[in-house]
Amino acid sequence: MPPATAPLPAPDAKAAAHGEQVAAALRTRIEACGGWIAFDDYMRLVLYGPGLGYYAAGASKLGPAGDFTTAPEMTPLYAQALAVQMAAMLRPGADEVLELGAGSGKLAADLLAALDSLGRLPSRYAILDVSPDLRERQRATVAERVPQLASRVAWLDTMPERIAGVVVMNEVLDAIPCALVARVSGGWQQRGVRFDGERFVLADRPLAAGALRDLAERRFPPEGEYLSELNPAAEALVETLARRLERGVLLAIDYGFPRHEYYHPQRAQGTLMAHYRHRALTDPLAWPGLCDVTAHVDFTAMAEAGVRAGLRLEGFTTQAAFLLGCGVLDRLAAVGAPESLQYIRAAAAVQRLTSPSEMGELFKVLALARGIDCDWPGFSLADMRHRL
């Protein structure tokens, strides 16, 4: 159900019926757990519950008809710039690409086309995605945009045991279920969800000593009332990928901050939000199962997870610096005449991707590597590793 203060467009009958199914499953889960579930359990069910969750059911998610738009959806210039960095990293013996959470498949198709033009096609482009409907959309996108390269694309049900090449995570880490922890009146609380008879509400329970509390005590500011996210699951994913990366590079692109900015004393209410029909909502419980729920990424934690697994930190910078370093403006200049509609649209997309007031500063790019010595054009304009 939507928050009372947010005038959201009502879902159609099919979406509303699906939302009721998700709500019923949530109520059953909460009742089975004694009337309360931790927020990461809530997020896991509403996003990934089999046949129910936002990413596991058939709702339109991307583009004008969906709830949000990612960088690859805006312009193929994004993939063309990214391909410049990937071409420098792919080499014999480390020439596969693994993309997690491939969305509509547009990034995969555009990357394949761009890498082909650079003479650096991967031997295989593997996609690991939990969403059955997005898999079908990805297949259709690849078949439509790069039919001659479709045979190189494979869909995986599980993470491969061995990875040699480039792992790409574009807006993946922000959607991994996170825990909510609060320090209230000097005591530690874990925030979760209960059902009050009419609606789902956030509710706290004391957080006992353990790994989650240890993280909060180390990362939160030392004093004051404070609420924020911790994401051991995202850290575990990066560490697992890193351990399986025998040779190659892990690239993570997402919105977030280094730790000292993420857990700044003034950011005392965390970063959690929901996305519905291109609206950003502060209520993460709005329309369960019909909204995307996300939190910003603690890039320091992700870098630490990779380093624990033996990877080297090779780069950290803003999306703007990365794209400019990879020559996105040169590719824009080749689109067409400046007065053409095609150029104007492409320029608008590049402006949104690189502007500090849009996606240019909030989105970051992190590179972790093993056994690869290559050029790093994406990190040539701004090396921000010292900020992690």
Image (cartoon, grey):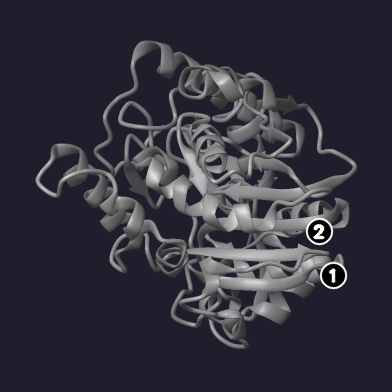
Q: Amino acid at mark 1?
A: Arg
Instruction: Please tell me which residue is depicted at 40% across the width and 41% down the height of the picture.
Output: 76
Visible residue check, residue 57? no
The secondary structure type at the circle numbered 2 is: helix
User: Label 2 neighbourhood size at 10 Å, few (<14), some (14-19), many (20+)?
Assistant: many
- Which quadrant is the N terminus positioned in? top left
Give percent across and percent down for residue 287.
44, 33
Image point 65% across, 64% down: which residue? 367
Residue 230 in the image: x percent, y percent?
A: 66, 63
Residue plotted at (52% across, 60% down): 296
| Viewer-nearest residue: 344 or 184 | 344
Question: At numbered mark 1, what does the secondary structure look like: helix, strand or loop?
Answer: helix
Q: Does the image show residue 118? A: yes
Q: Is residue 287 left or right of residue 165?
A: left
Q: Which residue is mark 2?
A: 239
Dot 2 or dot 1, earlier in sequence: 2
Residue at which label 1 appears: 308
Q: Label 2 vs label 1: CA separation?
A: 7 Å
Question: At x 37% / y 29%, what residue is drawn?
Answer: 66
Task: Kindly give the residue lying farthest to the front in the view shown.
Answer: 119
Amino acid at pointer 2? Glu
* Numbered mark located on residue 172 in the image: none
Residue 36 pos. (x, y %)? 67, 44
Residue 377 picture location, percent across and down: 53, 68
Residue 2 position by quadrant: top left
Are circles 2 and 1 on residues that touch, CB within 8 Å? yes
